[in-house]
Amino acid sequence: MQRVVSADKRKSAKILNDDQSVPAPQPIQTTSTNSPAGNVPSRLQFNHAGQKSVSPNAPAISTQQKTNVQAINKPRNEPSFTNQPPINGKPPIDSMSSSIYEPADSKVLTPRGLRRQPLAPVRAPVPKFYFPQGKPVSQHENDVAMRKALDVFRRLPGQKASVNEFEEVIKAAGIPLYWKRAIYDSITNKKNVDITQTEFCVWWRNMTSVANDEAARFVYALSGGKRDYLEREDFQSLCYDIIFTHPGLTFYHSATEFHPSYVDVVITRIFWNVNRSWSGRITAQELRRSDFLAQLHFLEKEDDINKETRYFSYEHFYVIYCKFWELDDDHDMLISKRDMLAHDEGALTPLVVNRIFSKAVVRGSRTEHIVEFIGLAEFAAFLMADEDKKNLTSVEYWFRICDLDGDGLVTLYEMEEMYGQVRDKLTSNKIDTMQFGDVACNLLDMIRPKNPNGFALSDLKKCPLAYRFFNSFTNWRKFFNQEINEGEKPVVRNDEGRELSEWERYCAEEYESLMEAEGDEQIDETHSVNLDDEDMRNSFKDLL
């Protein structure tokens, strides 16, 4: 490798040599890469007069080596300050743009001269933006909450909290009220014993070390810290706590035989609105996207439980239970296919009933084998889907029913097979029907699917009239009503001005009808005459 002597260095050496007060430069040696002996010192040097000289101790240089050295030291068209007049004692502007004034760190020294080296871009560190357990909470904030809870323990006898006293501890720690029973069961392993402050501190430390936001802490509290998701059984403690502690369910305390039914319906509604993945497991991310935790906070402030219409309304449970009880002839809390065919005066077709009993709409199920019976939970999901087909979960429910082969597409063949049974029902009731071709053309024009061979779930979710599509193949009564009635149903609002959903409207109408029917029965019983009673007989005779 030859050492390059640039033109500016040679100029500097000449200028310094003219000034006698400045010492002359030291001899500079150059090497030739073409030398047979490798890195051999060159005989070419500078003397004190600034002229080239040959060192007597250096070996002789060949003609080829001299040529190489001269080629390397040859100037590369760099600007010369001596040929241009100075301006105000400074070099001309053109020379300022020369490469010799550019930063040294942007160039590298190579055998071919100076070459530009691009500077590496400075990249700022990307802050962390994904927190599966929620954004971290400061340790100081967690310690303050724990100290408030410990102050409550110190005021209790023996510094222990019973199941009834544990409510004060929960409130002091800033935990939502209706988590208390689930946390109590998690600490005591579902034993009816008091909790010490040490046990609560251990639970609090373990919980805050892995869960930061409310959704992650809710999953930890109900699962006992064993899983990062919730199953149906995990919600039982919460539901039973609401039954026994909420002011709106005080009348329901003594009806213990109906408590499991209320819990089943509430848990089904929770999974219906929260578990959008149909996995049968509710994660913290699904809780963040839902309004469930907000509705739990609402229950703490609202004494009328029927105003919470998403999950815990007793009136909604009452409607579901009564509809189930009407179909359950033997009252064994199970419905058979024969019972299901009687729903809404035979509105369902046999093919639809078979699909409901095939576990195609059971959350977390990986098979579609036929079952003989379904319970209250499965019926509650069906009723919500049947009465409110505008709900996105209902669209997913009926898409699973209509997708007979499970390929993710409701084809024209499947539509024709299902519509055939609907047409048979209409014909048996002496109602004129349309041909399948006309129905299919109407639906294609209304929904406009991307695939001309069938309808995908995304097509139906985007269409606000998807309920008309499902009525055409699943419920012949609803299909007939939508064909003879023009336009949409009028909008109904509650006292706060909020528009009621189709499900809320259905439950309000059915509950009112059920109350009127029970009132008529009570009136009949009150005015009935017991002729076996002597006083009643005498009063009856006087009346005659």
Image (spheres, rainbow, N blue to C red):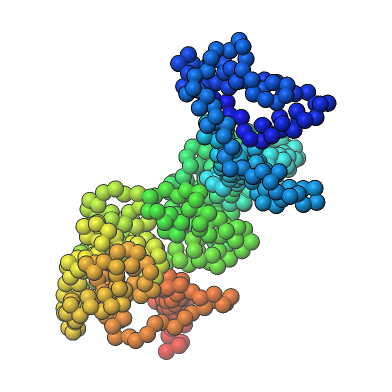
Q: Can residue 377 be seen in this view?
A: yes
| Left or right: 419 as drawn, with respect to 445 | left
Instruction: Please state if 188 lies on the left or on the right of 147 as rendered.
Output: left
Q: Which of 318 and 174 is in front in this view?
A: 174
Going by the image, does 397 lie left or right of 297? left
Establish if 262 lies above or below 429.
Answer: above
Q: Is residue 357 visible?
A: no
Q: Residue furthest right?
A: 21
Q: Against 445, is 410 above or below?
A: above
User: Measuring 38% from the left and 69% from the top, which residue is drawn there?
Assistant: 462
Give 355 or 137, whichever is nearer the viewer. 137
Quarter residue 359 falls in? bottom left
Residue at 75 percent of width and 37 percent of height:
154
Q: Position of residue 65 (x, y in %)?
A: 50, 22
Q: Which residue lies furthest to the top in this view?
A: 57
Q: In which quarter of the image is the C terminus?
A: bottom left
Q: Which of 214 and 253 is in front in this view?
A: 214
From the top left corner, tell me how far across and down residue 412 is, in percent. 20, 68
